[in-house]
Image (cartoon, rainbow, N blue to C red):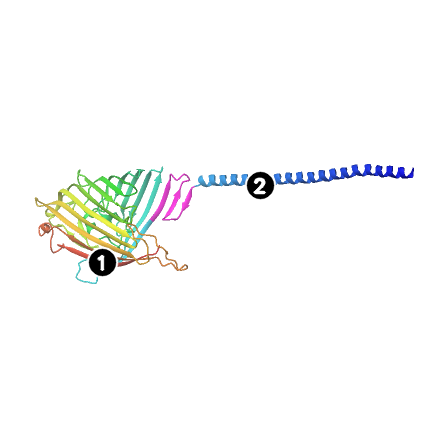
Amino acid sequence: MIAVRWISSLALVGIVVLPLQATAQQASSSATGSVSLEAQVNELDHQIRILQRLRELAADSAAAAAKEKATPTASAKDGFSLKSADGKYLLRFRGYFQSDGRLYPGTELTGGIDNLLIRRARPIVEATVGRYFDFRLMPDFGGTTPTIFDAYWDGKFAPQFTVRAGKFKPPLGLERLQSATDISFAERGLPTNLVPSRDVGLQLAGDFSEGVFAYQLGIFNGVPDLANGGDDLSNAKDFAARVFVQPFKRGSLQGLGFGLAGSTGFERGSPAATGLPTYRTPGQQTLFRYASSTTTPASNVFANGERTRLSPQGYFYTGALGLLGEYVMSRNEVTQAGVTAKLEHTAWQTIGSYFLTGEKAGFRSPTPKRPFDLKDGGFGALELVGRYGELSPDPAAFPVYASASSSAQKAKACGVGVNWHFT
């Protein structure tokens, strides 16, 4: 009986222990599942928080971009400018200033007085209105009398077609078309005497294939050579045109360009308002003038007929080397004491330049590789320049229409220089 009871007790214990072990295993498994589920919930919550933060950052960035787009901008590059948020309106203020010291070693030169002067003082106001229309105003306060040089608007409808109206440079002389901040010497050469400085007119212009072919075509009041245009002396007008080609714009000879410019028209002057030019040396001394008299004005020479100009021109820039050349012919019909003659004056020049500091030469002045800076050790750009040119008044002008004692029958000019471009 004892043995039986022990076996039964053992069996009972086994029955009790087995369910307890199963319950413990189930509890352990449930606890593990609960911990795993809680970790997953925490991970999902963390990811949701990250996504929410990224969404907030994206919204902030979009709001900042929209605010920046809606805010006008101001800058101080190439002058001071204000620009609307959509880029359709722009107002820019800039300008340039030139002071000269002119010294004439020879004492026999009439009017050659050593002098310090303000040669150019030109503030510039430019504006863009509605994306397509530009305006430019440039007075000059150099010298003794303030003058308006540029006052015009541009309609830039397409690269191939633009319209310009107002007072500006007619499309003739190559060096004249360069800004005074880009020319190689402080003064332009002799051929510039034979083309107008500024005139009032209307011009169509454009270029194709990013400048491979460019054209200008305009009608102007018509002014004498070297003159800064104003009111016309007669109903007749001048027509001017220019074509310029850069055939290798995308090739190894991309710096090569050449063209042809010309103008034609009629000028009807009078002994009181002659409509004729006076030519000057690079030192701004009188080189050639038509005969005139203050005591007998009726004997003055005056323009009275056709006026024609023609100018083949070109340049070549490769690396630091630059070459520019032009020829100008100016033919005028003039009258004195009832006798009319057709006089033809010619001039030509060639200009060479080379940047010792390695800048790339071009029709416009380059930006120095290392602008002048005392702290950073920048030196600027150093350029060597040379020029030779000639001007030949028509021999038939002497002695009736011009005096050999006050006008040169031929002029030659050569010059060398060093240009230091600070910025």
Q: Amino acid at mark 2?
A: Ile
Mark pair 2, 1: CA separation: 73 Å
Residue interval drawn in magenta: 72-94
Q: Amino acid at mark 1?
A: Gly
**Image check: 401 left or right of 281?**
left
Where the C terminus falls, by quadrant?
Answer: bottom left
Residue 76 percent coordinates (x, y)? 39, 48
Q: Nearer the viewer, residue 43 or 178?
A: 43
Q: Which residue is mark 1?
A: 415
Image vertical order of residue 6 relative to residue 421, above or below: above
Q: Which circle, 2 or 1, is nearer the viewer?
A: 2
Label at residue 64: none
- Crowding at dot 1, Cα within 10 Å, few <14 / some 14-19 / many 20+, comes out as few
Let me know if residue 317 appears in the view: yes
**Image check: 6 left or right of 201?**
right
Q: Which residue is mark 2?
A: 50
Residue 98 percent coordinates (x, y)? 29, 54
Answer with mark 2 or mark 1, whichever residue precedes in sequence.
2
Q: Nearer the viewer, residue 223 or 65?
A: 65
Residue at position x 33%, y 43% in the image: 126
